[in-house]
Each structure stands twice: as structure tokens, then as C-alpha cells.
Image (cartoon, helix red, strand yellow):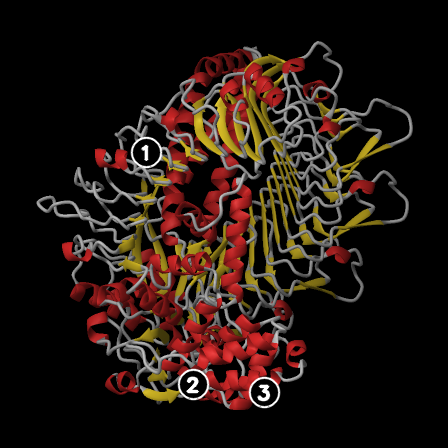
Amino acid sequence: MEFALNKIDKLWDNNRSINQHMNDLKRKVMELNGMKEDTDTRMSAELQPRKKLKREVQIWLENVERINGEVQSLDGQIGESSNFTRGFRADDVLKRIREVKDLIQQGKFEDGLVVDNPQWIGQVLSTRRLSGEGTKACMEEIWKCLMDDEVGKIGVWGMGGVGKTSIMKIINNQLLQEREKFDTVIWITASKEMSIAKLQKDIASQIKVTFCGDDCETRRAGMLFETLSRKSRFVVILDDIWEEVSFEKVGIPEPSTGSKLVLTTRSLDVCRKMSCRAIKMKPLVEEESWKLFSEKVGRGILNIPEVEPIAKKIVERCAGLPLGVITVASCMKDIDDLFEWRNALKELSDRKKSVNGLEEEVFQQLRFSYDRLKDPKLQHCFLSCTLYAEDWGIRERELVRLWIGEGLVEEMDSRQAEFDRGRAIMNRLLNNCLLEVFFETEDERCVKMHDLVRDMALHITSAKPRFFVKAGMGLRGPPNVQEWSEDLEKVSLMRNRELEVLYPLEMSPPKCPMLTTLLLSDSGIQSIPEGFFSHMDGLKVLNLSQNFIESLPNSVSNLKNLTALLLANCYHLKYVPSLSNLRALKELDLRGTYIKEVPHGMQNLSSLKCLNLNCSYIDEIPIGIFPRPSCLQELDVGQALISEKEVGELKKLEIFEGRFYDFHNLNMYVQAFHGREEPRQYFIIVGERGWHEEIFSSKTIVLRVGSAYLDQIMLPRHIEQLIVCDSSLESHEEEYPIFSRFFLTSLRNFPSLKILEIRNVKYTKRLFSPHCVPPNLEVLKVSKCDQLEEIIASEERGRVTMEFCLPRLKKMSLANLPELKSICSVDAVMICESLKWVEVISCPKLKRMFSPNCVPPNLKELKVWECNQLEEIIASEERGRVTMEFCLPRLKKMSLISLPELKSICSVDAVMICESLEWLKVISCPKLKRMFSPNCVPPNLEELEVWHCNQLEEIIASEERGRVTMKFCLPRLKNMSLRDLPELKSICSVDAVMICESLEWFEVKYCPKLKRMFSPNCVPPNLEELEVSKCNQLEEIITSEERGRVTMEFCLPRLKKMSLRDLPELKSICSVHAVMICESLKRLFVIRCRKLKRMPFKLPQVMMPFKLPQVEPSSRLGITPEVKKLYESIEWADTDFKYYFGIQRKVMELNGMKEDIGEFCFL
């Protein structure tokens, strides 16, 4: 009775205190998450291409993610418990508090988050195929010098356009494969205007050196010198050097001990002054030039009678320069008119024989390509590319936008048509080799100008049309007043981030009546004189984006010819003067500014096509601000409220982003586009603002509406992404799947729907009925829907099994669904042959993942966490029959965490074949008894983590005990961690061995029944770190089965760290008659291993002559008598090895207690 009363008293105390404990836990979790955010920020700074995350950081981040899920789940369970049963959860809460405190303590990472990634030594560069035996010979000569330790500096020289950069890009990529010879390969693109400061900055970015703003040139050089000196074998490639560079001033050490410096230049004199081994790159010989020309122009053209002799004369004019050959051939491609060929030869022959500052031959050919464009607008489009900084990638959309603003692209009814026309112009320039692709992705393309092509274009614009270009040249003050001449047509001062002042205040405004384009973006401008624009009546494009101005001068109001006013991301901009006179304005970009009201005069902008008011400080767009009729084709008001009537009246709208108040507004908007083309791109929020997550589709609607009836909602027919969150969508028919009514007549009306996300939506038991499954859905995310029971509900229960096909579904995420019992009904299966990524988290009532006939064959990643009733991942319905095989041939990552009922990954009479599996994590699966059966060991596994699995006895279970020893090979396994496995007795069966030749990091902790680690024939030769702790029965690390025979040697040549802690039965690291050769060992920790009697380490023969002074550790370090006695009692297999190690005293805080711990550590 007294015992029961005590229990009741404790439960009553727990009930009273659990709220306080839970609040404490949430505060600690908040602190932990703050630390994680700080860690994420540090990772962004530290995790550079040459670095990789420390293993301990990866584990910590995973544990933070896990504990967040567990706390969230625990909070939900407590909230659902009765007042009487809540107290039973108190111990769980206190346990989580301790875990969170431990994670906070572990997460400081004072020594940094990353380590060097030995696999990354430099950046791969884009290349093109090179032609000619001479080019091949030159490359071989350069490579020979790079491999020769006697040659430190190499200078590749030759005239512009001969291919120096192209050949060095190929060599750069080849050097990246020489990891045994070089540690770092650094590519730097120089230029004529290259300064010491710019060179230092570029090198620093490559080797991850951070300069402070006030660092002087000498200090920067010292920092670079120190960092590069630590890299014993570096290669620095300086491309396009125009004059001698002082290595001392820059901070580049003189190459030695295998390091190299390579430069490309047009001057032999530069090579000589910099003491380089000069290698001349010669032009192509006649036959090579002709072959290259023929490939580019097309052999079909050359088959026309009389064309070939003319073409050969044209090739002669190219003087063997690949750039010239390619450029001219591109101009003549597909031209079959003999007169065109004759005229081309005449034009090339009539060129001037010399041009200042440029190679004569290549200039002639490039100018020829420019003249062949013929269309003046096309030529102006090309010349506009010079307005961007040298060697800078130019985004295609930005460049076409500039051409449209300048009027170089003819005006069309559609903005999309204008961009298509602009892209066609760009393709014409690319095909004529006047531009080249800098990089290209699925969504965008960047182009750049070859430095010689840019030089030619700048030469043209030095006369007429006259340009003034100082883009990206590091200006620290305004240009000279005299440079603002009256004949200027285009000016670019962009990317001079310390310009601050655009024009001296004391001077009268510049007079530039012919100026049409003024590009000043990202130049650090803080203010503009009031009358600066007074004499720029012809200005069409004004780009002031990314500056620090707070207001625009009133003189902007009189720029009557202005077509584009771009002020994006001027975060301090508060005032824009009246725009009522700017009737020619077609584009106004105010996104990211500080303005709080729409500028005055908007209703007068009758030509306006593009308006961006995506400012976080504008709450609502006033009615009547758009001109009538309106030409608006692109409208972006961000999350500001806007009237659906205003938007519906924009008859030419192509792109729209904005927010409506409720469903009524959305319905009116959809109805407004009935019978006419809806915008080709839109992002619409309905309800509350505050959406900041990434959007993946061009036609997206986000519903955040609180409470609503489903039959009130209409959606655009061609919607691609739908997000419903934080809503209570009530229905008149509770039993019917709610989204059948939500989408009115059914989802079959939305064949374009690709992404569906449902989050925190109430009153939803089923998502789809059999007749409303979206056929082209690619991504499905469902979370925090408390009443959801099924994703797809079958209406024909008990009849023939129904199949629901989602043939394009690639990604599925189900999270925090407390009532979810199945993905589809018991008598139905969901076929998803394209499914690649599955995540199921906190679905406590889910019992099965996949049935045998719906295993997704293309699955690449599977993540299942916190599903309390889940027993199997793949459930076989034919138990006791022939063993079934389930193949997941593309599965690479699998994570199974906190699955208390999981007994096996697939049924007992089935095996899962995952030949591509690279990463497997199994944590807190207490009923799991086996990991792998002998016939399903994943051969490509690289990382394995198994933690907190209480019944797991073996990692690999052999089913043929007592027979011939079996070998299980994991040839690519690099990292393995086994923790808290109380029943684990061996890694694989007694009559089996596991071969892991690539294993680098192995951790075993809290495995109290483990008796052996490695048998003699499965010691991993590439092991670098071994950590073993809290294994109470472990007696040996390497168990020899040939006791008393010839001494055995175990070689671990790459082992750097061995940590053995809290192993009370450990008597030796390997058997009495065995030694270990560990020539790389630098850190050896042996802590609380009181029975250890022997250290088996032996120096390799090559190190035997080397001796250290025999200094007893106790003569210089304070140690306890017990530790000293232990140290002196240990037998060393090699006394020479002993003197590499000493004992140091380490004091650790353990629950507030101080304890002396003896460590062996490298001296």
C-alpha cells in the first residue's frame, strides 16, 4: 500500500511539474536551434570547395534534426494525454532535456566545422577541342615542364587568338587528376587593367584567405605568402598577363619543391622579365587551318564549284590564328552564293594593315565578322556587350532586357516575343563567335566576350558610336569631368563598389544630349546631384540598381525619352519624384527599395509594360493607379494586397505576382480570364502575407485562408503548383475525399498540376478519391494534417484490388500525420514508377510502407522516421512460400530512425536487393534483429551508421553456420559507426568475415557484448581513425587464431588516430605474438583500459635509424602514481616506438567531478 501511495505521489508531482519541464525543454531546444542556425551560417562561410564537413559535425546536425522531431512528437503526445496519464511522460521529458544539454555542449566546435577535402584540388574549367599537331606538341612541352621538378616558372606566349587560354584550360583540368603530385591548382584570369589588389583578391578567394577591409597591400601579400608556403606543391596559372608582375608584392612564393607558376602572355619580354621557361605557341600551319575552317563552315559548302579556291585564300588571310579561323568560318557557314564568297575575300583584303594596341591579323578577321552582321541594330546589340566588365559573365536575360530598353529589339505585342527575338539575336552573335557561352543551365545562360573581341569592340566605340566604359575597374572616385563629353552615347560605370560620388557637386551638370544608356548599378553611389540629369534629354536606359541612394533627384522627372528606370535593391531609397512626365517609360523596377507608397504619376505611364513594386514596405496597391487602357505585361507587387478587378482588367498581362484577400477575390480573378489567355507565369498568395519559401514552378498559388467552404474555390486551369497551408477547409460531405470538392469537378481539370503541398489543414480525412488523382503530379508533400487517414481512398473496398497510377511522381513527403494509416486503401495499390525520393516522418499509425507489387523501382532515397507502428518497409503477403526478391536498383540513401516496432527491412521470407545503396543509417529501431542477410549485402555501401538497436546481434548474419567460412565484401565502405547495441556480439557471424578494404573511419561505442573487432584476415588496410569505447567484454581489437606460432604482422599504414576508452577487459590490442606497423599514427588515446598489458606497435624498417632522446615522461610531466605505475607496467613490442609517446595529465569535467585521465599522445 505504501509503495502504491509513493507511486501516486510521484505521479502527482510529475503531473504538476511536467508543464514546467516541457517549457524548459522547449527553451533548450530553442537555444539548440539557435546554435544550429549559427552553425549553418558558419558552414556557409567555412564549407568551401576545398573543404568537407567534419564527421562529428555531420553527426551533431543529424542528432539536432532527430531531437527536434522527437520533442515535437513528445509535445503532441502530452497534449493528447489525459490529466492523469500526462505524468507518465515526465521521465521522457527529463531525458530529452539531458540530451539537448549534451548537444548544446557538443555543438560549440571551437576547432572549426570543416577539414580539408583531399579529393578537391581545383576548379574544372570548360574547354573546347583543339586542332593541329603544333598545338599538341606545345601542350606536351608545357606538360613536360610541369612534371619536371627543375622547372618552376613557365611562360606560354604567342599572339592574341592563337589559343593560349584554351590550351591552358585543358592542362588545368589534367592537373586536377594529378593529386599525388599537386595539392592545389589555382586559375586566375588577369587582364590589361589587372591591379595588385585585384590579383591578391582573386588568389585569396581561391585559397580561402579572408582580407579585412583595412588590410594594406603588404599585409595582404604576407597573408597569401604564408598560406601558399604551407602548400608544398601548388600550381598557380595566371592567364593573360600584359606586363611584369612582382610575385613579392602579390604574395606568391617563388616556386620550389615541386610548386609551379604558369602564365600566358602575348609578350616574350614578360616571360623573360619574370624568369620563366618560355614556350611559344605558334599559329596553325596551312593544312591545319584549312581542316579547322572546313569543319566549321561545313564540307557541303566547299563542294560547290569555284568556292574552294576562294575559301582557301580566305583561310590564308586568317594567318593560322584559331580564333580568326573559327570566327570567319562561322560568318560564312551555310552561304552558298559564289558572289558572297568573292565579296568576303575582298573585304578581308581591304582591311587596314595596322591598328594600335591590337594584333593586326586577328583584328582584321574580328572586324570582318562584325561588319558581316550588316544590320546596324544587330551591330549595336553586339557593341552593348562592351558595357559589362571584362571577363565578366553576362546573364542572357539582363542583356536582352538592356537591348529592349535601348530600342534595339523591335517592339512586339508580347514581352515574351520580344525576349525570344532578343535570344535569336544572341544566338546570331554566338554563331558568329562574337560572343561565347560562359555557363549554361536548364534555366539560364550566361555569355561573355573574348578579350580580343572586346578590345576590337572598344576600339570601334572609341569613335562613333562613342562609349565611355569603366565597368569593374575599381574606381574610388568620380570620373574626370572632361570625360562626360557631349558626343557620348553610352556610359557604364557599373561594379565600381567604392565610387560613392557620381559627379562633383561644385561642377555644373554634365551636358550629354546624345546619351541613351547610363549603367551605374552596384557602384556604391550614395547621392546624386539634383540637376545631374538636366542635360540628358535623350536618355533611354537608367540603371541605378544596388546603390545606397536615399532619393532620386527631381531632374529625373524630365527625362521624357526614358524607357527603363531600374532601381532594384536600392535598400535605402525612400523618395522617387513624380513620374507623370515619363510617358515613354516601359519598365519601372522598384523591388527591394524602402519606398512605402506607390510613386506619384503612375496613372500617366501609358507606355508602361513592366512594373515591379515588390517592396516589403508597401502593404496595399491603391485602386486606379494603372493607366487606362494599360499596356502592362509584367506586374509584380510581391505580397502587397491588390484588387482582383485591377488585375483582371490588364488585358495584356503575361506575368503576375501579388496577393488577394480571400477566395472571393481569387474566384473573380479566375473568372476575369475566362475565355482568354491566362498569364503564362504567376505567383498568387490568397490570405495572409508572410510566405518566404522557395517556389519551384512558374504557375503557383498559395492558399493561407483560415476557414472556408470548399465549394467557393476556383483555380486557374493550367495551375502547376498548389500550396494549401494553415487553413480549415470545411465540407458538407465529411465522408467524401475533401479534395474532390475542393477542386470542384475534380483534379482531372488540372492536367498541368505538378506540385501539391498540403500543410496544417484541418477537417481532412482523405486527400484524393479514385477519380481525382492528378495524372501528372511530380511532387506531393503533406504535413501536419491531424485528421488525415489516407492519401488515396478506394470506394470499392473488398472488391478487386484497384491500381492508382501516378506515373510522373518523383518526390513524396508525408510528415506529422498522427492518424495516417495507409498511403492508399488496403484493397488498392499506388503505382509510382518514377518515384525517386520518399520521406515519411512522425506517422505513428502507419503500419506498412510498400506492398510487394508497388515497390518503386527508381527510388533513390528513402527516409522513414518516428513511425511507431511500422513493422516492415516492404511487407510480403506470401509468407512461408518461396523467398521473394525486391529490387531497388537505384536506391542510394536510406535512413530509418525511431521505428520501435520495425523487425526487418523486408519480410523474413524476402530479401531486398539494393546494389546502388551508398548510405545507410539505422537509429533507434529496438526490435530490429538483422541488418543484412548474406545474399543482400549492398556492394556499393560507403557509409553505415547503426545506433540504439537493442536486439541487434549481428550486422551481417550468415545462414550457413558451421560450413565453409563465408566472405562478405563491402569494397567501397569508408565510414562505419556502431553505437549503443547492447546485444551485438559480432559484426558478422563467427564463420564469416567482412572485407572492407576502403574503410577509413570506424567507431564502436556502447556495445557491451562485443568480444571481437577484427579477425586477422579482415583488418582494413586503409583505416585512418579507429574509436572504440564502452565495450565491456572486448578483450582484443585484432584476434589472432594462430596463437603460439610465428609472429604475425598487421600493417595499418594510414592509421592516424586510435582511441580506446573504457574497455575494462581489454588485455591487448592484438595477440601476444603479433605486432602492428602503423607508420602514420599521430594520436593514440588509451583511457581507463586497466587490464591492457601490451602495446604491439612497431616502427617500420625505413624509420629504424631515427631515434628520439630517451626522456622518461615522468621527469617532465606531473602524473599520478597510479597512472605512472600503469604506464611502466605496459610491455612494448618495440621500445623505439615507445619514445614517440609520453603521458600528459588531462583534467575533464564529468558531472562537476575532476578526474585524472592518463593519455598516450604524439610528441
Q: Which residue is mark 2?
A: 142
**Can you identify the residue that label 1 sits on?**
593
Q: Earlier in the sequence, mark 1 or mark 3?
A: 3
First in sequence: mark 2 vs mark 3: 2
Q: Which picture quadrant has residue 184?
A: bottom left
Check the image and report above or below for 286 versus 489: below
Q: Nearer the viewer, residue 585 or 751?
A: 585
Res 40 → quadrant: top left
Amino acid type assigned to the residue bearing label 3 in the image: Pro
- Asked whether the beta carbons under mark 2 and mark 3 sit within 8 Å of each other, the answer is no
Question: Sequence order check: which comes first, mark 1 or mark 2?
Answer: 2
Whether label 1 touches label 2, CB < 8 Å:
no
Q: Which residue shows up at 63% across the image and 75% down it? A: 298
Q: Position of residue 191 (x, y in %)?
A: 31, 69
Q: CA distance from mark 1 to mark 2?
A: 52 Å
- Residue type highlighted by circle 2: Ile
Instruction: Count neighbours of disc 3 (C-alpha within 10 A) and say few if under 14, some if 14 to 19, many if 20 or more.
Output: few
Give the number of the disc on residue 309.
Answer: 3
Q: Nearer the viewer, residue 740 or 486?
A: 486
Where residue 354 appears, x then y in whole percent? 32, 81
Q: Is residue 850 visible?
A: yes
- Of the 4 image quadrants, the one containing the C terminus is bottom left
Q: Nearer the viewer, mark 2 or mark 3?
A: 3
Badge 1 density bin: few <14, some 14–19, many ≥20, Cα 10 Å? many
Q: Secondary structure at mark 2?
A: helix
> Which of labels 1 and 2 is toward the front?
1
Give me the C-alpha separation between circle 2 and circle 3: 36 Å
Q: Of circles 1 and 3, which is in front?
A: 3
- Residue 838 is left or right of residue 850, and the answer is left
Cα–Cα span, label 1 and label 3: 62 Å
> Around disc 2, counting alpha carbons within 10 Å, would you say few (fewer than 14), some (14 to 19), or many (20 or more)?
many
